[in-house]
Image (cartoon, rainbow, N blue to C red):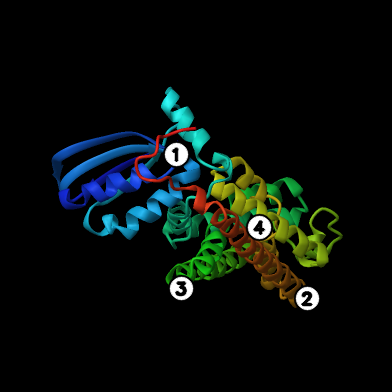
Amino acid sequence: MLHLRIITPSARTDAVLELIDTTVGTTHVAVLEDVARDPSGDIVLCDVAREAGDELLHGLRELGIDKVGSIAVGNIDLSLSDRADKAEEEAPGEAADAVIWEQLTDTSQEESTLTITYAALMIVATMIAACGVVLDNAILIVGAMAVGPEFGPLAGISTGLVRRAPRAVWRSTVALVVGFAAAIVATTVFSLVMDGLGQFEEGMLDAARPNTGFIFQPDPFSFVVALLAGVAGVVSLTSSKAGVLVGVAISVTTVPAAANAAVALSYGDLAQMWGSAEQLLLNLTGIIVAGVLTLIGWKLLWRTQRGRMTRPPGAPRGK
């Protein structure tokens, strides 16, 4: 269940209540008249089944409540109520499959903004991966993949393309490009420093690396895995399953490819550098393509349910 706190001008309160009444899966409606101060108006509280949440939010935005008032949404972890149970039964579909597009957009925007924290994580993850490729250590590679924050911008690009939001696509693209560029430059310098300290040697990069040699040798399976990871990542975001997202992060060679490119660049090994760059671009493209196709499929699936999201005015709630 989702809990909505709506601040609305008094003149629009009746329209808001009618929308809530005609949306399936709603319950626990309360109205606090003339208590809001900024913005001024009434406060309407209600709970709605997650499956019907996107439809209700869409209707509230069509009423302009987000412009003249406020819409706040929170997850209800536990609701002990027969009415809540009936509301969930009334809403079509399953809560775990529901997509709250506004929430997805907000989450992807937060995760795809170029910040100091994002850049720091990218740089540190790439440096860890650099140690992994030089030492041929799979554990360090997996650790670096888990630390890397690059899936946020990838999800932001996919969401922006599906929602036709060019500004979101641009913001995410900038974060992705600048993040990887900064990480590669910093890791190249890091590699030179480690070489000067005697910790890295060119021979370690050229030696047989059974655990990490795949990083600069892209093949069709690289693109297939990227596609599968993109699907899993988007599904995890829409259902808020963080554990799945961690699994996605450690399944695709993005940060390690950038790290291998940086180390190879520091030693002038252009063959490995270009192979790593190709691996990186292949995986990034695969994730974005899969993300876009998955979101389009999700959108079409829930569009077929839209007609079941409303009830006639005055009809009883629940089955």
Amino acid type indicated by mark 3: Pro
Q: Which of marks 3 and 1 is nearer the N terminus?
A: 1
How many angstroms separate mark 2 from mark 3 (CA)?
35 Å
Q: Name the residue under label 2.
A: 271
Which residue carries the number 3 mark? 166
Q: Nearer the viewer, mark 4 or mark 2?
A: 4
Q: Is mark 4 on a helix, strand or loop?
A: helix
Q: Disc 3 to disc 1, how far (Cα)?
A: 33 Å
Mark 1 residue element: loop
Cα–Cα gap, marks 4 and 3: 20 Å
Question: In front of the other: label 3 or label 1?
Answer: 1
**Marks 2 and 3, the one that precedes in the sequence:** 3
Disc assigned to residue 25 = 1
Which residue type carries mark 2?
Ala
Amino acid at pointer 1: Gly
Q: Quadrant of residue 210?
A: bottom right
Closer mark to the observer between disc 1 and disc 4? 1
Q: Could you tell me which residue is drawn at 66 percent across and 69 percent down? A: 285
**What residue is rendered at 73% in x and 75% in y?**
274
Q: Which of 168 and 191 is in front in this view?
A: 168
Asked if labels 1 and 2 touch by Cβ distance under 8 angstroms, the answer is no
Q: Give the residue number, with chain letter if any, for mark 4.
A: 230
The secondary structure type at the circle numbered 3 is helix
Instruction: Establish if 272 lies above or below 310.
Output: below
Image-quadrant location for residue 23: top left
